[in-house]
Amino acid sequence: MEMEKGKINVQTENIFPIIKKFLYTDQEIFLREMVSNAVDATQKLKTLAGLGKYTGEVGDLSINVVVDTKNKTLTISDRGIGMTHDEVIKYITEIAFSGAEDFISKFKNKTESETNAIIGHFGLGFYSAFMVADKVEINTKTYKQGGQTKAVRWECDGNTEYSISEGDKTDRGTDVILHISDNAKEYLDDYKIYSLLKKYCRFLPIPIIYGTEIVKENIEGEFDDKGNPKTKDVTKPRVINNTSPIWKRKPADLTNDDYIHFYHELYPDVYDDPLFYVHLNVDYPFNLTGILYFPKVKRNLEVQKNKIQLYSNQVFVTDNVEGVVPEFLTLLHGVLDSPDIPLNVSRSALQSDSNVKKISNHILKKVADKLNDLFKNEREEFEKKWDDIKIFIEFGMASDESFYEKAEKFALLKNDLNQSFTIEEYCNEIKDNQTDKDSKIVAVYTTDIDGQYSFINAAKEYGYDVLVMNEIVDNYFISAMERKNDKLTFVRVDADVPSKLINKGDEVPCKLSDDEKNKIKGLFETSVDKNQYVVEIENLSETDMPVVITRKEFMRRMSDMSRFGGGGYGMMGAFPEAFDLKVNANNPIIYKMSVSSNEMENKRLAEQLVDLAMLQQDILKGERLSNFVKRSVELLNKVEDKQTDDKSVDDKSVDEIHIEDKQ
């Protein structure tokens, strides 16, 4: 065959710069494309042999990847169908013509499973090689005519001109030789290529060989003193991939151990077993297989993302599946594989694909069905796992309305006694004692059992049940529940004094006159920053604390959302801290201050009471904390001298003190 030259049939002279700069997001994708092409060519040969269209020797179909640092080449070799001279012209130089579509058209009456196996990627995928190579060679020999057809060599140095001549390949198949450019020398590094093959090719259906490895083999007939077979080191070709991942098998053929073993194959650095898994196996109206695992999650959500691997016919596409699966399920681990998901280099194009949207909806439904089955059939076990899976479910209910409607049947609320209820069960549990004057059921909750201990105890004295809502997503989950049920509202246990947490319209008479209330209010206003604290005189029980610092539920939620950047509040920056300082007009200490003329002593006592309330809220810091400690020591030193007087006041009610003072 004489050498001939030609020009690639493209519409622009600048196709290669476009490929290098814009076609692929990641330069390293070229290796995936090259190996995928080799796999496709091999799969085609297997399909033809299975259909009786090829009756010759099949033999070893492994694909070899070889780095030659001396000659600065990277070669991908297969023993697939190869190409004739005309096919090289057609499939390699005529970019607009898809080799895969042409091949499939010849077998369009075959079954879907048969045609899926012969889909090729020659076309633009092949030209991704020019992202890293100054020159690309193809040395190929077709399977046709019993191997009598001559080999073909095609060469191109990164412009639209190419040369084609007789090749020297003697075996069926194709060698693609990439002459790596100086600015891509990293792709001549052994570990780099190994890592990329493990990333993109670890589950391809044809064995991928890269280099060699040393393995232990038993020496036949030889044993040590303990009767164990003796071994020897043997050098063997290193196979990169698992050609038969379990997501391609039927769930009925798999055991729980198979799923656990595969999980650790996917994530060798994760030591905990998954909580449970969902095996996806759909063939209509789209094709989808895969396994999603519920892992034990850490409270830092960010480190858990990008754990789901997306494949198309066992070819790795991405581990950023936002848009492909509902956002809240990006916290799961596992694999998804669908030939209906294009090997798209643009994630925005992937997200807008109609099949991808259908797949996303199906995954949501399957996950919800699995959780509902576990709840209905194994509620006790479900409750034990709740703390590990609640973050998925609450995140989903807060962010996806369709999931909320499915999940409200099995989502759980847990109180500080570790009792679990569905949302409906809990409303029925508390409605008799925790319904306000507007007929709203009020759920009282804590975000910190230890830090809010005194508030929890005070609420329990009123007979309130206290939920534990201590996850990052709980704020959003609470808001979602309130949106879906206008007769249910949530209030944190420290949002108000206990008697006011649930507004039932009851009023306690005030024992102070208006002048006494104004005096007390002014006294406490001088003890705090007016820009941060609003002083309110409250008519509470004599046994309630003299001073309590609370924070309105709405203000606290706004602040939390601002801190976590959610709900749009992150756009406004940090939400200012603001508190209500509630002074109990009916507490004996407050009454004593209202009738005392010792301004200095009143001021010290007001500061002490404010600091105690701040300490209860864990907001007493810095210089104020230091002053509080010193003042407390001074007050303790005076206790012995004033003990008798203090006891006489403590033993009397406010009414008795009031009468004596008036006299």
Image (cartoon, rainbow, N blue to C red):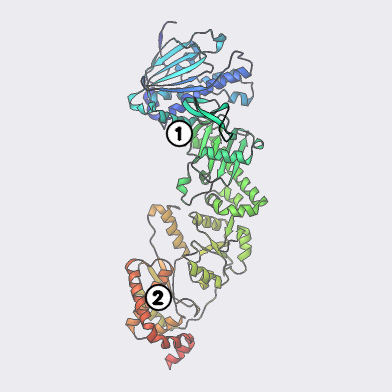
Q: Is residue 240 visible?
A: no
Looking at the rendered image, the disc whose residue lies closer to the viewer, 1 or 2, is: 2
Determine whether, in the image, residue 619 is placed left or right of residue 55: left
Residue type at tag 2: Leu
Q: Residue furthest bottom?
A: 663
Q: In this view, does 515 lie above or below 293?
A: below
Answer with the quarter of the image where residue 578 lies: bottom left
Q: Is residue 82 above or below residue 383?
A: above
- The x, y position of residue 56, in whole percent, is 59, 13
- The x, y position of residue 215, in whole percent, is 50, 29
**438 and 459: which one is in front?**
459
Q: Can residue 632 be seen in this view?
A: yes
**In terms of sequence position, does the residue under pointer 1 or pointer 2 come before the other?**
1
- The x, y position of residue 294, in whole percent, is 56, 46
Give the structural element (helix, strand or loop) at label 2: helix
Tag shown at residue 346: 1
Answer with the quarter of the image where residue 506 lies: bottom right
Residue at x-position 61% and y-position 49%: 406
Residues packed near mark 2 inside 10 Å, few (<14), some (14 to 19) or many (20 plus) = many
**621 and 346: which one is in front?**
621
* Whole-number angstrom distance, CA of label 1 to CA of label 2: 61 Å
Q: Quadrant of the N terminus?
A: top left
Q: In which quarter of the image is the C terminus?
A: bottom left
Determine whether, in the image, residue 389 is placed left or right of residue 96: right
Residue type at tag 1: Ser
Residues packed near mark 1 inside 10 Å, few (<14), some (14 to 19) or many (20 plus) = few
Give the structural element (helix, strand or loop) at label 1: loop
Residue located beneath label 2 in the image: 609
**442 and 377: which one is in front?**
377
- The x, y position of residue 256, in whole percent, is 62, 41
